[in-house]
């Protein structure tokens, strides 16, 4: 996300969330090492993954709570919000295994880290298989620790129970969304609707709507605010993902951490791609289709594809959608049900999520 | 486990647990298909995995509850106990990916099922990669649904909160144990202590001790019974795993579902192996070591290895340990803290877990 004026609605949450994650990890490292000291590299890898990221889900959870009238800086909601980072860590570790990605945020992916450990020690068997197996297990640990941290956040048990509906829905939705995404890639889907569905489940609900719902539920205000947060979170989430998809094609590697054209090389079935194939003439569409997903795509081919995305009007259509969805999100914030303290931060987040350059 | 006199302490729990799993899956299938109809094969694979198995963990959870004075046939404890089957389903699906196992209980492993779906539809990309990715995600769904089902079991929120300590410990321990197991394989560890540690975390705590603790906690009797169930569950769990390891070498493929010598071909670092290497003379140990983990081990080599396990005294030592540990488990049941209704079933389970032929 773009450089923040400090303190921003993100930065205030981030430092509190970081502190809770550090303290949870410290106690759990002790427990793991009691089981076996050889678990230290697994814990190192887990902490390395947790140390990065924008803390988007905790941020929306926190402002969902404040919008429901929850108290400023309540340590319980910070812990409940931080628990979503463990879910995200699992999702990223497992995604990287599934996609065979070598890096994550410019550092070796978890399975690559553990494969390197295998090589370094000269253990028997295949280093890559060991790395993948270890990353699957460390991801599982993150998933289990997510709800452990949520349940141990300090809220009364019946309050926590009230938050389970969004908490559980979020997990089912992100895993289902990820499965559908994997499926769309191998089916080579070209429809706008399929691309939008993946965006709704993998991005909008998971990153924005459900975390807001969770915050509202913990504040005892899900009934009143559920619709407001859906009206804000769903369009914003799609706009956010669209911005991500545009950056995945055109983005500057200096700021995004991945080379321009990366999504084209990977063959991601994004809305940008669907719009391009829909709008281009059939010859150009055929060529675009045949280049999409070529791992060693040349610079020249990337340039040609980028030009087609622009010339066909697909880029402009996506930018217009980002604009429209952002407006929709902003207008949902007019609701009188929303506590005034959250209105400005939630407005700020629309801008940050859709105008960012990385 | 050996054929049961019907109704046995296992069979009464099993049918109730099966019913709760079927009903949970029915409602969650509906939710998944609302997200996308293409999720049906994922749900089919999940249900196929859940439909098998001995329901050992739910059985111990249930009798842990009864031993704490919990009521006969309480639907809430059946649901909480059944939730452990989702954890087990995740563990098995992910293990099969990690070990690249083609079958599970004589049927295609989850990742093989999904790879076949890919091939059948002629989708693009690599069928095996698709299958593995899908199995990782379906396993994640199982892990998330495990604590969802637990939290929705119908107990009061504060009662559920009281069960979280064993519930959470169990998950961390099985994942840590699985990681250590993977590590011991690649390190080619030969020590008894390392083999015992994996047995304690992967088998004893996960399969027996923690499920009993969970049942006791739900009955509000963990303080009084924690030590009793540890005294019963830890030796029984190690004895159970030892029986499994002996069957993995000598077992009749007709009853175990895997060929004799299978664990030798896989190169599993079991206590049976550690005892053999410790006891055999150095020439025989070297030969045994060089054969261990050879995927295409001949019948003759398997026979030679089996003979060494017997002749070295390793088999007898393991059988003696099974005997001793079973005695220890039985004597823990003398505790006056234990509700009398659970004593006979828990005794029966010692016999069933250690004398079984498959």
Image (cartoon, coloured by chain):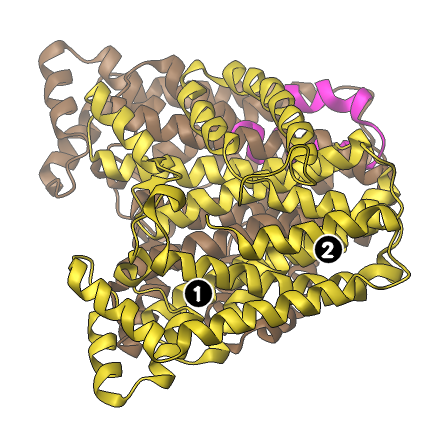
Chain colours: A brown, B yellow
Magenta-highlighted stretch: main secondary structure?
Answer: helix
Quarter of image, res B237: bottom right
Please identify the quadrant where the C terminus of chain A is shown: top left
Q: Is residue A227 magenta?
A: yes
The residue that appears at 37% across and 32% down in the rendered structure is A245
Q: Residues within 10 Å of mark 2 (few under 14, many from 20)?
A: many
Work out whether residue A345 can be spotted.
Answer: no
Q: Which residue lies under the disc numbered 2?
A: B166
The residue that appears at 87% across and 50% down in the rendered structure is B340
The residue at the far bottom in this view is: B282
Q: Residues within 10 Å of mark 1 (few under 14, many from 20)?
A: many
Quarter of image, res B255: top left
Rendered location of residue A208, percent (x, y): 60, 32
Rendered location of residue B30, percent (x, y): 57, 15
Mark on residue B181? 1
Task: Say whether marks 1 and 2 touch (CB < 8 Å).
Answer: no
Tell which of B41 and A108 is nearer to you: B41
Rendered location of residue A352, percent (x, y): 55, 39
The residue that appears at 74% across and 42% down in the rendered structure is B62
Q: From the viewer's perspective, tell me whether residue A162 is left or right of residue A142.
A: right
Quarter of image, res B324: bottom right
Q: Is residue A253 magenta?
A: no
Q: Which residues are magenta?
A: A203-231
Q: From the viewer's perspective, tell me whether residue B272 is left or right of residue A146.
A: left
Instruction: State which chain disc 2 sits on.
Output: B
Q: Are marks 1 and 2 on the same chain?
A: yes
**Callout 2: SS:** helix
Q: From the viewer's perspective, tell me whether residue A26 is left or right of residue B193.
A: right
Count of numbered circles in the view: 2
């Amino acid at each position: 996300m773009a450089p923040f004026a400090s303190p921003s609605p993100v930065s205030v949450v981030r430092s509190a969330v970081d502190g809770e994650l550090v303290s949870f990890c410290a106690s759990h490292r002790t427990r793991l090492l009691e089981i076996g000291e050889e678990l230290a590299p697994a814990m190192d890898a887990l902490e390395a993954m947790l140390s990065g990221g924008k803390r988007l889900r905790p941020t929306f959870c926190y402002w969902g709570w404040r919008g429901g009238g929850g108290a400023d800086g309540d340590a319980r909601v910070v812990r409940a919000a931080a628990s979503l980072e463990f879910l995200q860590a699992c999702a990223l570790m497992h995604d990287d295994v599934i996609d065979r990605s070598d890096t994550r945020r410019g550092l070796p992916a978890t399975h690559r880290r553990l494969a390197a450990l295998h090589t370094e020690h000269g253990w028997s068997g295949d280093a890559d298989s060991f790395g993948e197996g270890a990353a699957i297990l460390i991801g599982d640990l993150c998933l289990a620790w997510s709800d452990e941290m949520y349940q141990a956040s300090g809220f009364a048990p019946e309050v926590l129970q009230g938050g389970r509906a969004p908490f559980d829905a979020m997990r089912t939705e992100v895993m289902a969304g990820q499965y559908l995404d994997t499926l769309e890639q191998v089916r080579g889907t070209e429809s706008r609707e399929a691309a939008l569905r993946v965006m709704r489940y993998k991005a909008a609900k998971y990153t924005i709507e459900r975390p807001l719902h969770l915050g509202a539920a913990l504040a005892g205000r899900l009934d009143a605010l559920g619709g407001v947060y859906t009206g804000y979170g769903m369009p914003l989430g799609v706009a956010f993902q669209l911005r991500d998809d545009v950056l995945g094609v055109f983005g500057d590697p200096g700021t995004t951490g991945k080379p321009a054209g990366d999504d084209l090389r990977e063959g991601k079935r994004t809305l940008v791609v669907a719009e391009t194939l829909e709008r281009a003439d059939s010859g150009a569409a055929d060529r675009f289709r045949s280049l999409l997903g070529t791992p060693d795509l040349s610079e020249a081919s990337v340039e040609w594809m980028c030009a087609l995305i622009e010339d066909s009007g697909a880029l402009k259509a996506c930018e217009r959608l980002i604009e429209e969805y952002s407006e929709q999100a902003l207008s949902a914030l007019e609701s009188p049900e929303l506590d005034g303290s959250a209105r400005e931060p939630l407005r700020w987040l629309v801008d940050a999520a859709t105008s960012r350059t990385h």
